[in-house]
Image (cartoon, grey):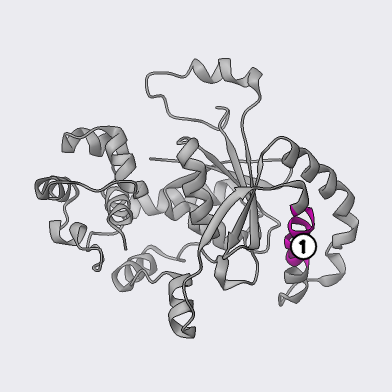
Amino acid sequence: MTFGEKLRRARKEKGLTQAELANQAGLGLRTIIAYEKGETYPQKRSTYQTLADVLGVQADDLHNEETATHTAPLSRAQWENIKQRYEDLLPDGPAWPGDPTYEDYCEKMAQSTQVDTATNYHKSTGLELSQTTIRPALTKDFPSLLQICKERYRFDSTRPGVDKSQLPTFESRLEALTRTLVGWISAGQCFLIEANGRPGAWFVLQLPASDDYPAANKRKGGAKATASTPLPRATMRGPYTDPHFSGASKYMLTFCQACCPRLAIEVPLDDPLCRFRLAYWLDQDFVPVARAADGTMQLISHG
């Protein structure tokens, strides 16, 4: 686990925002953000110690990237609040993707080894780690983008417990998807994720309309974003079966936050992997704020 990942997890478990951690540690907010994103590291040993003292962890655990943090899990009240918020917004949607009880959550935290799925896959197969890149999708990428969407429908048809007769076919949605893709590509809002040059996932990053910015600018003085605050919105499409792209959401988040520190994530609830994606975003300090009429859940960063 990297220093940035440890710092973010320890801060969240301490119940601090990035601004609160920066204030208590005597550092700048931008410095904390850069630390957690892995853009930079503390240059002095004393900085590690200061952060460790604030967070209640060992400085060596923060400094050594081969060890895991040994901080306490979220309090029962914090964990139950997140779970209740999720279930209030999704009473008839995917079941709570976290642990069924607070005790199960604490046990998992105690036993967690934080093994990265993609790294574990490559270690077990002896294959080299793939080089993942993100670039704007072009018109020539149209077949690849559609194929990734087609994989979703194929993935749906193989899942146990799914009524195949009720599933829409890929062909029935092809025309609408094509029109939407044309608009996203033309607006420069569609981005392709490739592993060693091979496409496997894509996402859309949509900025608020220009008319929405005046309202957004009125929210100054550090006010927290709400469901009505216009934020850039990112939505992942694919992957569904390829372990080379198991970290796609992480790559998307890093890419989007590099240009949009304040970000909303939209997860289509009819996506076959929505349960796991919601769990990932909750773990990244995002909280659900709204359920849209089109069947998507919107989350924003809590930090």
Query: Which residue is depicted at the point 89% across and 60% down?
Result: 171
Nearest to the observer: residue 120 or residue 197: 197
The picture places residue 227, in percent across and down from the top left corner, at 56, 33
The residue sitting at 33% across, 40% down in the picture is 33
Say whether residue 99 is visible. Answer: yes
Bin the neighbour count of mark 1 within 10 Å (Cα to Cα): few under 14, some 14-19, many 20 and up: some
Q: Nearer the viewer, residue 293 or 28?
A: 28
Residue positioned most to the bottom: 125
Q: Position of residue 194 (x, y in %)?
A: 60, 60
What residue type is disc 1 on?
Answer: Gln
Please, what is the dominant secondary structure of the magenta stretch? Answer: helix
Query: Which quarter of the figure has residue 197?
Result: bottom right
| Residue 17 in view, yes or no | no
Instruction: Give how far across and how far down residue 258 sits, in percent.
Output: 46, 40
Q: Nearer the viewer, residue 4 or 288?
A: 4
Q: Which residues are magenta?
A: 141-153
Taking 33 as reference, is 280 left or right?
Answer: right
- Quadrant position of the C terminus in the picture: top left
Is residue 2 highlighted in magenta? no
Name the quarter where the N terminus is drawn.
bottom left
Position of 172 compared to 123: left or right? right
Residue at (51%, 68%) from the top-left corner?
A: 130
Tell me, yes or no, whether the highlighted magenta stretch contains residue 150.
Answer: yes
Horizontal side of 256 relative to 158 (left or right) equals left
**Residue marked by disc 1:** 147
The part of the image, by quadrant, that contains residue 96 is bottom right
Where residue 129 appears, as percent x and y from the top left, is 47, 71
